């Protein structure tokens, strides 16, 4: 494994302010993140970027230029050593300079370089040789991209395709939207007619979204939800698509056929793209680690007190751990259910003893999320809870008192007993309309909170009186999805269809929202604050991780190195509380993001 002195990090940022740019298409080709370089001589680079100087001496530095812009700010530069199972990304600053600290490129050898900058490719592919203890320099020259369309995020596609907001909402603003599973590129570059799209949509309904992966870097894998007969009954006969609100397949199909290449249409000559990172958003490092199983669908992850990352696979039976100190993975198989078409583990929450709790598909219940289980790393043994229920929730969280909140259940993690069962569906003051339970949390008073995705509420159940309070989000139809509660009893969460980060102060019942600044970004979850009080939210449609400073209201967007970005849960590293860790569902990678400010 590579030597990683200190820590490794994640990448980039993209500011959302400014004006969208039109980028001309030179000619069509399949170019994603161009791979670089030229053989270079070893030189001395003494003026590293300020944020990187604190990380140690530079291993590789240079400038990024193009004929149209000169020195370029906000270009993501990624380095990967031949044979390595990870890559590192930095971002060029306002003077077009980039620098990799030696703490992150510690090994000598041949490295491939690639970039991400919408509208540009590297002019000359190649490789760079790094020598231990020396600083290499490599100036990068960019040229107009041969295939801008292959560089766009889903949010950028939605900015470019024709249609009303209502039509685009059918595609993106759904609990399991088209962009929930794959990028808009697949739709726009297809040639299906409206009638053919109905069949495609029906086929999509037969797959389990959280058990499939559909990136461009790894082979796509689809998992059938049910048996053939059940799929025929539920998918073939259904006339709707999506959940909140319901959309008819025929309406969605008709719209999709107006934005793709059917009927002889071609892609436009120019595209609007989001601005590249600027300022603080360039001061970041991103490290991506390949998981051992390249078809892993790591829907969830969490961290223990030692800084290890734990994860599960929603379509396979194992629990995995990544040790950042040694950059090594270890996985343990789970017992397999025989009465399900397929199965796997769901949301992970690590208790104070370092034991990961999760749900796993089981023959004891018909639901995919199965039963609640726990793994003891010391004994390497599993234990599964059977509380006599017919259904167990998907999502888990740790309460301040150390107990496990599993959806509407409260579990004693030491005695393995059920302490409480919360219910709001039968609430006499329940507002009209659909309601879907999602992410649970509990504050220091023992009050239970859960995001109500379909109703756009945060539901509160008083631990003593059982009184239920419905906290409506300020933005209608915001669809609060996932998040975490902090030590100050503040519930941080993402508003998936409102493009907001939000916070409910459970002590005062005050709710606050902060816009990401990028339409159609789809923020999915939120972290607790880092060491400086900043909260992070990954947004797959925009390929960004947003960073909010609640004190100033500043919102940054760190652009990710890959457009196949899809994260369901993110964690602030408990060791130092400076880095953010997350699992990327679409390309089976663990991602570490470390801001340099």
Image (spheres, rainbow, N blue to C red):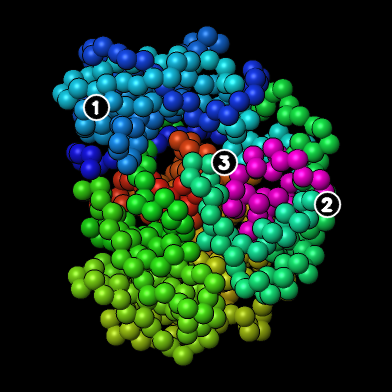
Bounds of the magenta span? 168-194
Residue 1: in sight, yes or no? yes
- Whether residue 517 is situated above or below residue 210 in the rendered picture: above
Nearer the camera: disc 1 or disc 3: 1
The residue closer to the viewer here, 433 or 206, is: 206
Residue 284, by quadrant, is: top left
Seen at 24% across and 23% down, the residue is: 130
Q: Residue at x 59, y 21 (%)?
A: 146
Point out residue 243 in the picture as x, y percentages from the top left corner: 69, 64
Horizontal and vertical percent position of residue 437: 57, 71
- Sequence order check: which comes first, mark 2 or mark 1? 1
Question: Dot 2, crowdedness within 10 Å: few (<14), some or many (≥20)?
Answer: few
Q: Residue furthest left?
A: 133
Tag 1 secondary structure = strand
438 left or right of 429?
left
Residue 542, label in figure? 3
Crowding at dot 1, Cα within 10 Å, few <14 / some 14-19 / many 20+, comes out as some
Instruction: Write down the residue under mark 1.
Output: 109
The answer to whether mark 1 and mark 3 are in CB contact below 8 A is no
Q: Which of the pair 324/488 is nearer the observer?
A: 324
Where does label 2 land, which residue? Answer: 195
Q: Earlier in the sequence, mark 1 or mark 3?
A: 1
């Amino acid at each position: 494994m590579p030597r990683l002195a200190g820590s490794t990090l994640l990448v980039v940022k993209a500011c959302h302010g400014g004006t969208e740019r039109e980028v001309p298409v030179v000619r069509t080709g399949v170019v994603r993140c161009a791979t670089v370089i030229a053989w270079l001589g070893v030189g001395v680079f003494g003026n590293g970027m300020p944020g990187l100087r604190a990380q140690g001496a530079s291993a590789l530095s240079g400038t990024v230029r193009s004929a149209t812009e000169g020195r370029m700010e906000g270009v993501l530069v990624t380095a990967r050593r031949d044979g390595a199972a990870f890559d590192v990304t930095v971002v060029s600053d306002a003077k077009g300079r980039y620098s990799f600290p030696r703490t992150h490129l510690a090994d000598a050898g041949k490295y491939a370089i690639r970039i991400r900058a919408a509208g540009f490719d590297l002019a000359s592919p190649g490789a760079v040789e790094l020598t231990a203890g020396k600083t290499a320099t490599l100036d990068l020259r960019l040229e107009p991209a041969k295939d801008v369309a292959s560089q766009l995020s889903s949010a950028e596609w939605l900015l470019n395709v024709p249609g009303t907001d209502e039509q685009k909402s059918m595609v993106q603003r759904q609990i399991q939207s088209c962009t929930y599973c794959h990028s808009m590129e697949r739709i726009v570059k297809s040639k299906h007619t409206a009638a053919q799209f109905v069949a495609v949509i029906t086929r999509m309904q037969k797959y389990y979204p959280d058990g499939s992966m559909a990136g461009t870097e790894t082979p796509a894998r689809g998992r059938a939800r049910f048996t053939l007969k059940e799929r025929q009954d539920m998918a073939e006969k259904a006339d709707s698509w999506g959940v909140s609100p319901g959309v008819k397949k025929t309406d969605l199909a008709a719209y999709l056929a107006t934005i793709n290449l059917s009927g002889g249409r071609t892609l436009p000559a120019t595209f609007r793209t989001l601005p590249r990172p600027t300022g603080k958003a360039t001061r970041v490092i991103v490290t991506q680690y390949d998981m051992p199983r390249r078809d892993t669908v790591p829907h969830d992850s969490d961290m223990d007190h030692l800084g290890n990352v734990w994860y599960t696979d929603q379509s396979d039976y194992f629990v995995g751990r990544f040790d950042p100190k040694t950059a090594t993975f270890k996985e343990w198989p789970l017992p397999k259910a025989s009465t399900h078409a397929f199965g796997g583990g769901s949301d992970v929450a690590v208790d104070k003893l370092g034991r990961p709790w999760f749900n796993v598909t089981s023959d004891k219940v018909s639901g995919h999320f199965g039963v609640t289980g726990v793994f003891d790393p010391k004994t390497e043994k599993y234990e599964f809870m059977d509380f006599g229920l017919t259904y167990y929730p998907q999502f888990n969280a740790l309460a301040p008192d150390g107990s496990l909140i599993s959806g509407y259940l409260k579990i004693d993690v030491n005695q393995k007993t059920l302490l409480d069962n919360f219910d709001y569906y039968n609430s006499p003051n329940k507002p009209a309309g659909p309601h879907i339970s999602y992410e649970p949390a509990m504050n220091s008073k023992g009050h239970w909170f859960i995001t109500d995705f379909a109703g756009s509420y945060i539901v509160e159940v008083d631990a003593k009186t059982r009184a239920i309070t419905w906290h409506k989000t300020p933005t209608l139809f915001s669809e609060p999805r996932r998040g975490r509660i902090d030590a100050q009893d503040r519930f941080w969460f993402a508003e998936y269809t409102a493009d907001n980060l939000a916070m409910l102060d459970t002590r005062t019942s005050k709710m606050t929202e902060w816009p990401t600044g990028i339409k159609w970004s789809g923020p999915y979850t939120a972290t607790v604050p880092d060491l400086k009080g900043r909260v992070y939210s990954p947004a797959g449609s925009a390929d960004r991780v947003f960073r909010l400073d609640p004190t100033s209201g500043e919102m940054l967007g760190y652009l990710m190195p890959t457009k196949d970005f899809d994260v369901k849960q993110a964690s602030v590293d408990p060791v130092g509380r400076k880095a953010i860790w997350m699992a990327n569902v679409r390309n089976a990678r663990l991602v570490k993001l470390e801001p340099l400010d």
